[in-house]
Image: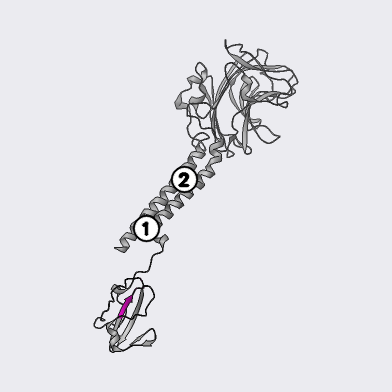
Amino acid sequence: MIVAGRSRSRAECSSPPSDVGFTSALGIVECGARTVTYEAWSSAPRAPWRRHRPAPGRSPGLEPSLRSTPAVPRHMTRRGLVGSAVAVALALGLLVLISAAPALASSPTPSNNAPIWVLPPSGNLFSGFSRNDYDEQDGSPQQVRSPDKPGQDAVEFDIPGGAQRSEMQPRIPNQVEGDVQYYTYGALLAPDFPTDTRTWQLILQWHHFADSGSPPVAVEVRDGRLMLAAEGTDLQDLGPVSGGDRVDLTLRIAFSRDPDQGTVDVWRDGRQVLVGYHPPSGTLLDNADYLKVGIYRDTSIDAPGNLWLDELRVGPTLASVQSPGSPSAAIPTESDPTSGPSGGGRGGSSETILWVAGGLLLVVVLSTAGSLHHRRRSRS
């Protein structure tokens, strides 16, 4: 008999080799015409030695029933797999939440019917505006009593003939790709306001961040009409206007650099006058727009300009900018388009990130459960 290269006597065939010290070792012992297989374990107490005779017609070899099961590494056990899966899931969730944090921190999260910015009827009306010398180069706005809303204050913008601008910027987040925002604007034009000018005269604009060029979206008073302009051209008629008229507008803007996605809807005096307008270059010309109100016009206009702003609301839905007692309250809900690049307001992108995080966690859990189930079936 030869074991591990050494001879043994026939008498030794009746007991297992005592010098086999490796774990889960399988060996073959030749005892004359017989071949014996054995399985030796190094752990104490030593397992009984098992041997068998080869089946008739089969060559000597290792029987499957006597093959030892290799030791399973700790990290490959069922408990180890579950722990690893949980760790991976938590890591993925943490990474996604970290990536979503800037969007969640910078984006307002109002309820659907809550505006994100409102011009108050009294108190310090300027507290919600950003002001600078450039915007007020031809006249600083003044807080006065509203000439047509008793008991309410208004912001008066007044510039002389030949002047260019008197404006302010509401402190609201910049409008970026995918945003859908609603605005309600209410102002009274002075009786001598030059509505019949044949050049540009803006009272409301969404300006891009470049230093030059006309804004992608603006409301103008010219040629006796109220117009929506895209980069100073492609004028959309919103109806007639004269000195002494009140201008009450509600707008819905889907912001996008893609002309197919950027849209503008306008209601005037509670009636929709512009439906799904697509500016030729989109509603964004660069990374973002910011809102400006007041008067900005061609210096060739030699008549003074004067108006009183007494209503301004910004929000994520039509309901959030509808003001009781104003024409905006009469806008029917069914006239409001609900689709947009992001399928909603600014919060849409962060909500999508959170849904993706939840989906990843669910996939990891289901994959782990399927793997464990497969291992149990394969073992049985």
Q: Amino acid at mark 2?
A: Ala
Q: Residues within 10 Å of mark 2 (few under 14, many from 20)?
A: some
Classify residue 239 by image quadrant: top right
Q: Reply above or below: 42 against 13.
A: above
Give yes or no for contact between labels 1 and 2 (Cβ–Cβ under 8 Å). no
Q: Amino acid at mark 1?
A: Arg
In this rendering, would 364 be left or right of 229? left
Give x and y (percent) for residue 277.
55, 32
At mark 2, the secondary structure is: helix
Q: Which residues are magenta?
A: 37-44
* Residue 357, disc: 2
Q: Nearer the viewer, residue 330 or 313?
A: 313
Whether residue 153 is visible here, answered yes or no, is yes
Q: Reply above or below: 94 against 190.
A: below
Residue lying farthest to the top in this orientation: 150
N-terminal of the pair, mark 1 or mark 2, is 1
Q: Nearer the viewer, residue 212 or 77?
A: 77
At mark 1, the secondary structure is: helix
Residue found at x 67% / y 24%? 167
Residue found at x 55% / y 39%? 103
Q: What residue does disc 1 label? A: 78
| Residue 41 part of the magenta segment | yes
Classify residue 219 by image quadrant: top right
Distance, label 1 to label 2, CA atoms, is 25 Å
* Residue 58, disc: none
| Residue 322 part of the magenta segment | no
